[in-house]
Amino acid sequence: MKVKANILGLGFYVPEKVLTNYDLEKIVDTSNEWIVTRTGIKERRIVKEGQACSDLAYEASIKALRDANVKPEELTHIIVATFTPDYCTPTTACVLQDKLGAKNCQMAMDVAAGCSGFTYAIDVARGLINVYPDAKMLVVGSEVCTSRLNFQDRSTCVLFGDGAGAVVIGSDEKNKKATIIDSLLRANGSLGYLLPVGKEGGSAKPYKVGSKVTADYFINMNGPELFKHAVRGMSDMALKILKKNGLTPDDLDLFIPHQANLRIIDAIAKRLSFPREKIYINVDRYGNTSAASVIIALSEAYSKGLINPGYKVLLVAFGAGLTWGSVLIEF
Ligand code: ACO
């Protein structure tokens, strides 16, 4: 790529409301002990009544814009990665554009790639910056996963949470916080059946007015099968993007894998012989926030001062589709 995509600012937002494992014990047949030992999750954030995907995206975006010293009117592109949009249409990106007052936007669109959504959106932004070198782009991962959770299904409802993260991207070299060195994606639609959301209620099986909403409207997944694909997919992806850039895991200062399950993270670390100390983990506090997961983690690590200039950071995500994605960043 001729024009570099630089990160000019970062921000994240999680709702104030905390749902602990003990709260879940009162809703489904589960226990704090089972959830912690099988997933590492202790609590997650959930939206309050009426808080939509665009509201979380707005809060994260305002922080990223402030960090970048960029005004909403300067934005030319908005990309929102989500599988829990406010509506089918208008897109959450268009709703967000309106809320921000980003009236000079040329393009606003959603990207749907499950939990890999943010890495997909970054790859799109890297391409776009080469078509529009003066662009100022807002790239967001935002999810209200709880809107697609069946709270009668203990095998899924304990895993997910709500939140959003955002970055401002431009070619500006002077005011950059970091440079996106590379991004690499993969998809395998033949495994989509392992994690369907909305088997009913979409055009494949539309609802009619007055239809009964069934469990098929919500997240369904084959956890143990996905576990294997997630470990293999994210490990392979990490090694591929590092090799492509002449690097090894030893060259990384921080590794941010998709925050789905602590056991998946540990299994990847073992495969890559990567030390735990260099892995950023917040799945214990936020659960799996899908497309928001890796950008919340990156933005949180950055806001805590854990990322120094010169640090090489690798994001790797895995999700429904199935999809895989990785982003290599140098601060
Ligand atoms: N509380 C108590 N027991 C439970 C719960 C629960 N919340 N959920 C399942 N169980 C039970 C099961 O019924 C089963 O009981 P049984 O042996 O009597 O049949 C037992 O626990 C073991 O179930 P498994 O599904 O084999 O448990 P496993 O160790 O595989 O953990 C988990 C399940 C946590 C879902 C794991 O498979 C996993 O994390 N998979 C990956 C999921 C994932 O990452 N998905 C997201 C990736 S894509 C994306 O992010 C959208």
Image (cartoon, grey):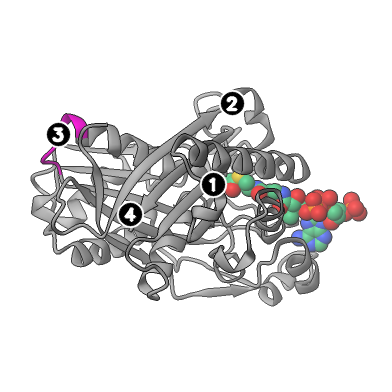
**Which mark's residue is nearer the viewer, 1 or 2?**
1
Q: Residue sitting at 69 percent across and 66 percent down?
A: 40
- When the figure is inspected, residue 219 is found, relative to residue 260, above or below; the finding is above
Callout 3: helix, strand or loop? loop
**Which residue was labeled with disc 3?**
132
Callout 2 amino acid: Asn
Residue 165 as seen in the image, left or right of residue 262: left
- When the figure is inspected, residue 12 is found, relative to residue 324, above or below; the finding is below
Q: Which residues are magenta?
A: 130-135
Query: Spatial distance from mark 2 to mark 4, Cα to Cα?
Result: 28 Å
**Which residue was labeled with disc 4?**
54
**Which residue was labeled with disc 2?**
188
Is the Cβ of the residue at disc 4 closer than 8 Å to that at disc 1?
no
Residue 228's quadrant in the figure? top right
x, y (%) of residue 183? 41, 38
Magenta stretch: dominant SS? loop
